[in-house]
Image (tube, rainbow, N blue to C red):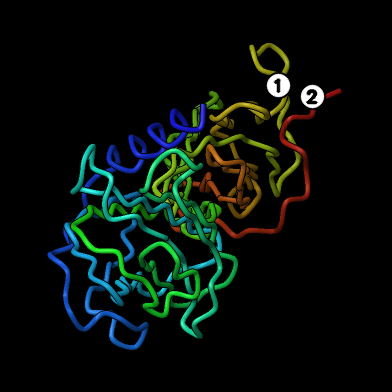
Amino acid sequence: MRKLIFVMLLMLLTSATAGAGTIVDDESANDLIETAGIQIPREANSSAYVGDFSLMPEDVDFVGLGPLVAGDVITAATTPLEGSGFSAPDTLLGVFDAAGNRLAFNDDAGGLTPGSALAFEVLAAGDYFVATTGYGDPAFEGFHNKSGSYALTISLVPVSAPNTPPDCSTAVATPEELWPLDHKMADVSIAGITDPDGDPVALTITSIFQDEPLVNSHGTESCGDGAGVGTEMASVRAASNGAGDGRVYSIGFTAMDDGGEECSGTVAVCVPHDRGGNDTCVDQGPLFDSTDCDS
């Protein structure tokens, strides 16, 4: 069972998308954190880096992972490439922070192989390092006599970015004006809502108000001057008070992305008094519920 777990971990590591910064051959001046010669960038998506290293007596190989953030996951494994049945070198594997504190450690990946494997979740933002040394050197100071080539596989799985709510600040009604005054119901959609993460957004009409009393709606199919609350499309009547200054509908809505974040807002629709000198609307405020029925 332990051997199977190690094999599955190795398959997981090597199945990730290889990053552009694939590890090159071992560098001699990488025995210390301060001289880690290879730096792996943090990709936006999960990525794996594989390279061939050579371990010599008193040698320690440090690989820099660059600045990581809390929630990022490091997985690493060594695969011996020499000896009978790929049994050498016998490695130890560790994860260190920039201060030299050993945060994770593995020897023999469950006891069935001279290779090593570990997984570590970052708890605080900072620079991190993966280190390989020979068996007998748990302090990673080079006190060992192991030698041979090995493959090092490192996988970086970034923490999921937080879901950002949609942006309702630029929402507009479509159309923004109704004409002619035929007293018929007209559909009004809402445009201009964006999502910073590019998530799909579902829109729901929450209210429809107007700044004039409702017209007599007897004999029409819809009761009141507004409809569509609870749906994604509003309908309002193309009508205005003959003695007024133009009717303004205030249509309230919410927009929710597929991660459950939402924003809300209100858009205005103008029904002008006429097409002469009174072709604009003066908003007197949302005084009347457009969905009410006339008595």
Depth check, mark 2 against mark 1: the one in front is 2
Question: Which residue in the structure is indicated by mark 1?
Answer: 217
Residue 97 pos. (x, y %): 49, 76
Say few, some or many: other residues with alpha carbon within 10 Å of mark 2 (under 14 / 14 to 19 / 20 or more). some
Left or right: where does residue 13 sit relative to residue 277? Answer: left
> In the drawing, what numbered circle is on residue 260?
none
Say few, some or many: other residues with alpha carbon within 10 Å of mark 1 (under 14 / 14 to 19 / 20 or more). some
Left or right: where does residue 293 sit relative to residue 12? Answer: right
Please tell me which residue is depicted at 38% across the width and 53% down the height of the picture: 76
Please tell me which residue is depicted at 53% across the width and 41% down the height of the picture: 257
Q: CA distance from mark 2 to mark 1?
A: 7 Å
Q: Quadrant of the C terminus?
A: top right
Residue 102 pos. (x, y %): 53, 72
Say if residue 254 shows up in the picture.
yes
Q: Quadrant of residue 277?
A: bottom left
Please tell me which residue is depicted at 47% across the width and 36% down the height of the picture: 189
Disc 2 is placed on an element classified as: loop
Between disc 2 and disc 1, whose residue precedes?
Answer: 1
Say if residue 278 shows up in the picture.
no
Q: Amino acid at mark 2?
A: Cys
Q: Quadrant of residue 25?
A: bottom left
55 up-or-down from 17: above or below: below
169 up-or-down from 226: above or below: below
Disc 1 is placed on an element classified as: loop
Q: Amino acid at mark 1?
A: Ser
Left or right: where does residue 124 sit relative to residue 116? Answer: right
Question: Which residue in the structure is indicated by mark 2?
Answer: 293
- Residues at discs 2 and 1 in contact (Cβ within 8 Å): yes
153 up-or-down from 218: above or below: below
Residue 10 pos. (x, y %): 35, 39
Please tell me which residue is depicted at 48% across the width and 73% down the height of the picture: 96
Viewer-nearest residue: 86 or 119: 86
